Amino acid sequence: MFDEAKGFAVTLKRLFAPTVTQQYPEEKRPMEPRFRGLPSLRADPETGEPLCVACGLCPRICPTSCLQLNVVPSEEGDRELVEFILMAGRCLFCGMCSQVCPVDAITMSKEYELSTVERDGLVYTKMELAAIGAQEPTWWESGVGEHRETNAPNRYDRFRDKAAELY
């Protein structure tokens, strides 16, 4: 009987509490700094071209193989990115592609409204991802976290202070 009274007390407490309604399409929830949304490509602000150097690390580390790169040799002797395709329907939003990128060309954006009627709407090309990535600040401008590359503490941080004392 005491359990039923406790449950009824919780119900009465919630009954008289003020309700908070958020008008969703007009007012969006503030996102946490480490939120991982749709992977996007950072673009050069002057030319609008993606910063990707076509190293091929992101498709190799992706657990679901949702990234595809088409690369051709350029005239200078290095590689040139022709096509970058992200299949967002297969993406786990794990962020491994952005962590492995040597030039910080891939970032996890704040995009979370990805609903479409057809599956073809979940396939993003290089220019679409560059347009999304142009909205995000670069990690050196964002100022989030001590290790701005990952926005997470490193496991060796605890040894850094002790190493400074030893040497």
Image (cartoon, grey):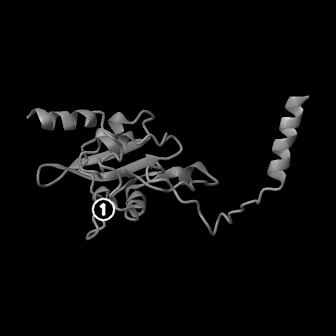
Residue 33: percent from left, percent from top: 44, 53
Q: Relative to 85, say whether 21 is above or below.
A: below
Residue 14 or 40: which is nearer the viewer?
Answer: 14
Residue drawn at x 26%, y 71% is 46
> Does residue 2 appear to the left or right of 145 in the view shown?
right
Percent x, y for residue 105?
A: 30, 52
In the rendered image, residue 91, in percent from the top left (x then y), is placed at 48, 42
In the image as oriented, which residue stretches furthest toward the right?
1
Residue 137, x across and y down, in percent: 35, 62
Q: Is residue 166 above or below residue 31?
A: above
The quarter of the picture where the N terminus appears is: top right
Q: Amino acid at mark 1?
A: Glu
For the point 47% across and 56% down, the residue is: 110
Residue designated by label 1? 141
> Tag count in the figure?
1
Dot 1: what SS? helix
Q: Is residue 13 left or right of residue 25?
A: right
Residue 127 found in image quarter: bottom left
Asked which quadrant contains residue 129, the reply is bottom left
Residue closest to the eye, 44 or 21: 21
